[in-house]
């Protein structure tokens, strides 16, 4: 009987000892996890604070980036979070413009919202182009001027969107909707502007030499963004051997009499450069080269001979952004030996 009792007591003590060991291990691990977690959060907080220190809207910067990186302290992910915050806000503003536009009753404000949506789409593309550069910090550091140009364009698009809306209530709603987008885009510009020093402070190696600086033109005088194929086309033009796809001529000697007709006739699935030759003459039209025509190359007979001129203006009921004599919906467009003019008509009361 006593042996049985002793065995039972021993078993109970053994179980208690095992439970105590397990509890101690779990508690120890929990403390270690907590300690590591607190350290990570502290490091992350310092990273966000460092990146946001030079921004104009620090509170918005720390809020949007801090909520996006989820404990990560990688400089790359902090930078990406700053760009993603701007993308998210622009997309939200785009959806807002769809809803607010339904309240526009007059033609000018309806047109303004159509333009606003186009501009916000362009802003989204610019931001995504900038975001794609963040995967390579070395490349990003070398292209800071380009990135700042893209981001500055995004802010310009937002302001142009607001400028076209004349109904006070609708403009106020859109202004509120774009407020954070403007702030976080401005913050992204500030971060890019300080990128090299920020990366150095986090001991991220950056190797930027004078030789790595991108030039606007190469040693032959061609724009640096021209492809090898474009250079061959220019060389062929210099030799008088460039054969255009279509010819535009006011006198009817070409296939088309207007530049817009030539652009509209371009096949949608055309690959390679679509070359348009615009003969000497004064072309009174407002030309818009859309995003689906990024591979157009256009040339004329000289800036004193081939002239494109427009005269649309706001007093005629045209939104300012649509008054451009020659409008481009993408960054680079090769155009040679042509002159663009804009004539403004004024009303005297």
Image (cartoon, helix red, strand yellow):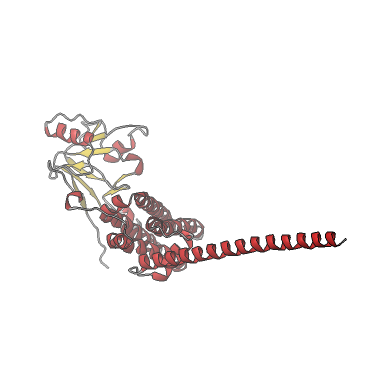
Relative depth, front residue between 262 and 147: 147
Identity of the residue drawn at 13% across and 41% down:
302
Quarter of the image with the N terminus in it:
bottom right
On the rendered structure, is 310 left or right of 39?
A: left
On the image, the x and y values in percent for residue 264 come to 33, 37
Q: Is residue 231 at least partly visible in the picture?
A: yes
Front in this rendered view, residue 66 or 173:
66
- Expressed as whole percent of the image width and height from the top left, the position of residue 62 reads 43, 67
Q: Which quadrant would the C terminus be assigned to in this image?
A: bottom left
Rendered location of residue 289, percent (x, y): 31, 44
- Which residue lies at the image location 60% right of the left edge and 64% below the top edge? 27
Q: Quadrant of residue 159?
A: bottom left
Q: Residue placed farthest to the right in the image?
A: 1
On the question of residue 177 being in view, the answer is no
**117 displayed left or right of 311:** right
Question: Going by the image, does 311 lie left or right of 104?
Answer: left
**Could you tell me how many numbered marks the image carries?**
0
Q: Nearer the viewer, residue 40 or 109?
A: 40
């Amino acid at each position: 009987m006593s042996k049985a009792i002793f065995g039972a007591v021993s078993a109970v003590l053994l179980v208690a000892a095992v439970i105590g060991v397990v509890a101690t291990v779990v508690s120890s691990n929990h403390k270690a996890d907590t300690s590591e977690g607190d350290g990570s959060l502290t490091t992350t907080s310092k990273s966000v604070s460092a990146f946001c220190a030079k921004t104009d809207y620090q509170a918005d910067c720390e809020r949007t980036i801090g909520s996006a990186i989820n404990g990560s302290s990688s400089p790359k992910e902090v930078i990406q979070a700053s760009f993603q915050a701007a993308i998210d806000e622009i997309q939200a503003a785009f959806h807002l413009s769809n809803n607010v536009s339904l309240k526009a009753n007059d033609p000018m404000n309806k047109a303004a919202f159509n333009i606003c949506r186009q501009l916000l789409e362009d802003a989204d593309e610019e931001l995504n182009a900038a975001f794609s550069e963040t995967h390579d910090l070395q490349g990003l550091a070398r292209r800071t001027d380009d990135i700042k140009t893209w981001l500055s364009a995004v802010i310009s698009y937002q302001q142009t969107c607001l400028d076209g809306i004349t109904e006070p209530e609708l403009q106020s709603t859109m202004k509120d909707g774009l407020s954070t987008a403007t702030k976080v885009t401005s913050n992204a510009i500030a971060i890019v502007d300080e990128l090299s020093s920020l990366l150095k402070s986090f001991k991220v190696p950056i190797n930027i030499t004078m030789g790595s600086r991108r030039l606007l033109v190469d040693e032959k005088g061609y724009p640096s963004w021209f492809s090898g194929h474009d250079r061959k086309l220019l060389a062929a033009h210099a030799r008088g051997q460039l054969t255009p796809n279509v010819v535009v001529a006011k006198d009817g000697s070409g296939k088309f009499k207007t530049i817009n007709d030539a652009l509209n006739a371009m096949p949608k699935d055309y690959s390679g450069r679509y070359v348009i030759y615009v003969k000497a003459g004064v072309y009174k039209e407002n030309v818009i080269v859309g995003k689906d025509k990024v591979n157009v190359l256009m040339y004329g007979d000289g800036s004193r001979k081939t002239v494109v001129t427009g005269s649309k203006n706001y007093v005629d009921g045209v939104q300012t952004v649509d008054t451009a004599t020659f409008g481009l919906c993408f960054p680079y467009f090769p155009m040679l030996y042509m002159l663009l003019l804009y004539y403004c008509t004024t009303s005297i009361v």
